[in-house]
Amino acid sequence: MPAPMKPTVLVLRAAGTNCEAETAYAFELVGAKTITLHVNALRERPAILQEVQFLAIPGGFSYGDDVASGRIFANELMSALRNELLGFIDRGGYAIGICNGFQVLVKSGLLPRLNGEPTQQVSLAHNTSGLYTDRWVRLTGNPERCAWIGDDQEVELPVAHAEGRFTAPADTISALEQAGQVALRYTAEDNFNGSDGAIAGICDPTGRVFGLMPHPERFLRWENHPNWTRLERRREGDGVRMFRAAMQHAKES
């Protein structure tokens, strides 16, 4: 009996992206096949989106974060690939945007799509400290809707950003809460950037498109943790759980 086909993930990069290798490796750990492409290659052959089941926009500093973090990459995607991206999602595709990738998804309007339209409804502003911050945080997930969140157990992940403070009008926050689209929150003591509602990640109404500021691809092995020699050893890093949850959801859908 032939082995089942592996789902294929497109890891999309641009000038300044710097987390594509780790992101691809995370998907490969949970049984996926990955291809990494520069956005120019996708613009030349948009039909690639019809050949993959997952899309990942990794972290980094796309286009040097000129204008605003993720803005240029977001504009490029929606001016050149809008119909193809929306078609990918409508066909049942899964997508994740990590850190800078989350900023891209938000500014492109692919998240949160509360009214179904790809228009920007929320923002990721400068941290309240005004500083770029690199640290570890504790978070809790909400598996109610998001395919990338497998349970509500606490996880610990690294963050590294200057523009990661989730903010939106109060009625938008309320709508996200009611729809179950708030997928990830900082614990009370770890909301270091001042995000509204301690929100660290959200999903779209389908639950298949997910964006988050923390970096799950940077905690795949227990040895990635700064205190790995002092704490009780775990089988793997907490970040693996998100990639595995999405893969499992896709298999069962």
Image: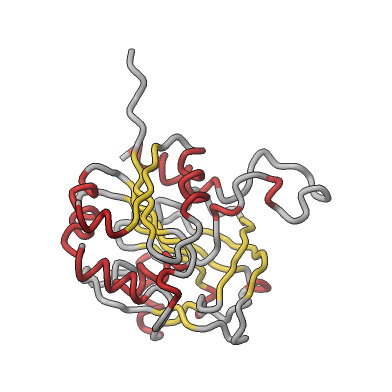
Q: Position of residue 70 (x, y in %)?
A: 39, 73
Q: Is residue 137 left or right of residue 144?
A: right
Residue 110 visible within the image:
yes
- View extreme (right): residue: 230
Q: Position of residue 68 (x, y in %)?
A: 41, 81
- View extreme (top): residue: 1
Q: Residue drawn at (28%, 44%), measured in percent from left and top?
A: 52
Give the tally of numbered discs: 0
Q: Residue drawn at (55%, 59%), measured in percent from left and top?
A: 215
Q: Position of residue 129 (x, y in %)?
A: 62, 86
Q: Is residue 71 left or right of residue 65?
A: left
Instruction: Tell which of 12 and 54 is nearer to you.
Output: 12
The image quadrant of residue 33 is top left
Q: Position of residue 105 (x, y in %)?
A: 35, 67
Q: Quadrant of the C terminus?
A: top left
Q: Residue drawn at (61%, 59%), measured in percent from left and top?
A: 157
Q: 35 above or below 38?
A: above
The image quadrant of residue 57 is bottom left
Instruction: Tell which of 202 and 120 is nearer to you.
Output: 120
Tell me the colour scheme of the image.
Answer: secondary structure
Q: 248 above or below 87?
A: above
Q: Residue drawn at (34%, 37%), measured in percent from left and top?
A: 7
Residue 145 visible within the image:
no
Q: 118 above or below 155?
A: below
Q: Quadrant of the N terminus?
A: top left
